Amino acid sequence: MGDNLLQIDDLTLHYGGSQILNGISMAAAKGQVTCVMGTNGVGKTSLLKAISGTHPRSGGGYRLDGQEIGKANAHMLAQRGVAYVPQGREIFPFLTVRENLETGFACLPKDQRVIPQEVFELFPILKEFLGRRGGDLSGGQQQQLAIARALITRPKLLLLDEPTEGIQPNIIKQIGEVIKLLRQRGDMAIVLVEQFFDFAFELGDHFVVLERGKIKLDGRAGTIERDRLHAAVSV
Ligand SMILES: Nc1ncnc2c1ncn2[C@@H]1O[C@H](COP(=O)(O)OP(=O)(O)OP(=O)(O)O)[C@@H](O)[C@H]1O
Ligand SMILES: [Mg+2]
């Protein structure tokens, strides 16, 4: 795996006095989907918070495109190409679709503050709804908006936290297609946190299963059998 865009090494994270991540080491390669799996409360979201800088890690190494990342907050990491689509989407309900997308401009230099045409090719519905308020979209459309907003920054690393949660099957399918298209471009590493097993299994090139803040299983598609992966995420 010469093309690891993300490499974390013995990463730990605390909330106050409680340790949630206990030494996570993993990598994510360009042009691949790395799925982070595991049952509720094992630390999947906390891992994405550490990688996105939304919550500081307490220890461990973090390399992005070969460069060591020291202490860096979310804004700095966004500028370095890390885009985070949080669990629950967190779009702004009172802003329009266009304004929601434009919030992604904050970490871009002024001359790059345009919505890439590609965003509307991936999510045509957003073009149609540019003037609607985010809060008036369906859950699935809001999820599409959240992903689109992340793409505004033309990221190198895209972090997706349970994008299928609470979403109708037809939009889940569309989101799966978008993830495949982004992978195909080959210039972006995608880390997908997902509990919808079939969705993750179909998309993943690489699977990392967490259990109580540790890695329980790390394997590649094609070398890890479906049943074994399913068992690992089910207990
Ligand atoms: N801000 C916080 N302060 C204290 N504890 C927290 C905080 N956020 C999460 N936790 C705890 O950390 C642990 C891991 O939570 P996290 O949200 O990372 O899990 P998760 O795997 O994403 O779960 P889920 O599948 O439900 O989204 C849980 O025990 C949770 O209660
Ligand atoms: Mg979570």
Image (cartoon, rainbow, N blue to C red):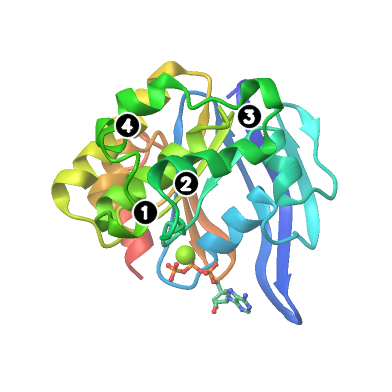
Q: Which residue is mark 3?
A: 5
The x, y position of residue 160, in whole percent, is: 46, 47
Q: Residues within 10 Å of mark 1 (few under 14, many from 20)?
A: many
Secondary structure, mark 1, is helix
| Nearer the observer, 93 or 229 | 93
Q: Residues within 10 Å of mark 3 (few under 14, many from 20)?
A: many
**Residue 134, label in figure:** 1
Q: Are marks 1 and 2 in contact (CB under 8 Å)?
A: yes
- Disc 1/disc 2 C-alpha distance (Å): 7 Å
Residue located farthest toward the right when viewing the structure as drawn: 70
Of callouts 3 and 4, the N-terminal one: 3
Relative vertical location of residue 195 with respect to residue 158 in this rendering, above or below:
below
- Disc 2/disc 3 C-alpha distance (Å): 28 Å
**Residue 100, label in figure:** 2
The x, y position of residue 34, in whole percent, is: 47, 39
- Disc 1/disc 3 C-alpha distance (Å): 32 Å
Label 3 is placed on what type of residue?
A: Leu
Q: Is residue 108 visible?
A: yes
Q: Which residue is mark 4?
A: 178
Secondary structure, mark 2, is helix
User: Quick check: 64 left or right of 133?
Assistant: right
Marks 2 and 4: which is nearer the front? 2
- Disc 3/disc 4 C-alpha distance (Å): 20 Å
Of callouts 1 and 4, the N-terminal one: 1
Q: Is residue 191 visible?
A: no
Label 1 is placed on what type of residue?
A: Gly
Q: Residue at x 49, y 55 (%)?
A: 86
Label 2 is placed on what type of residue?
A: Asn
